[in-house]
Amino acid sequence: MTFWSMMMVKVLEGPAEAAAQVWIKNRIVEAAAETISGFLQGEVMLSTDEPDQVCVMCGWEDKAAYEEWQNSPVRAKITTDLSGAVSFDIKTVCFQSIHTVSSGNG
């Protein structure tokens, strides 16, 4: 089953949309997809309930694939390049999928 990482980003200055655009314009999720073979999918989302919240959620084949991204020199460079670009507080939570249901339409 899929291993999920969910990074909750609380934007401390400016609009959440601007913070989300940092991930999109810098192709951060795409970098994970291009460099980690165990990457399955990723999404950048804006909260509809909390105007200062962004969520970056990624699915991985397993925890080892996620850890490979965490230790990746590509991720390290991105982190360094973006330090100071947007003021935010980040909390990451991981989940192991144990049951999946799909409508078949997605």
Image (tube, rainbow, N blue to C red):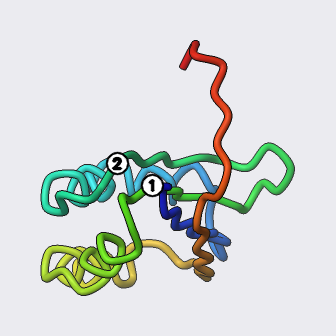
* Location of residue 59 (image quadrant): bottom left
On screen, residue 94 above or below 41: below
Looking at the picture, how far across and down is residue 20, in whole percent?
50, 53
- What residue appears at the point 36 percent right and 58 percent down from the top-left corner? 61
Image: 41 above or below 77: above
Q: Position of residue 10 (x, y in %)?
A: 67, 72
Q: Residues within 10 Å of mark 2 (few under 14, many from 20)?
A: some
- Give whichever of 10, 68 is nearer the camera: 68
Residue at 13 percent of width and 61 percent of height: 35
The picture quadrant where one finds residue 65 is bottom left
Outermost right residue? 49
In this view, 63 is above or below 83:
above
Foreground of the two, 68 or 87 = 68
Mark with earlier residue (1, 2): 2
State the mark number for residue 95: none
Badge 1 element: strand
Q: Alpha-carbon neighbours of circle 1 within 10 Å: few (<14), some, or many (≥20)? A: many
Query: Which sits in the foreground, 48 or 14?
Result: 48
4 displayed left or right of 84: right
Q: Residue at x 48, y 56 (%)?
A: 2
**Which residue position is annotated with label 1?**
59
At numbered mark 2, what does the secondary structure look like: helix, strand or loop?
A: strand
Q: Residue at x 32, y 77 (%)?
A: 64
Give residue 4's position: percent from left, percent from top. Answer: 52, 62
Q: Is residue 4 left or right of residue 34?
A: right
Mark number for residue 40? 2
Of the 4 image quadrants, the one containing the C terminus is top right
Q: CB of mark 1 within 8 Å of CB of mark 2?
A: yes
* Amino acid beneath label 2: Leu
Q: On the picture, is 79 further left or further right than 103?
A: left
Residue type of the residue flagged with mark 1: Gly
Residue 7: percent from left, percent from top: 56, 69
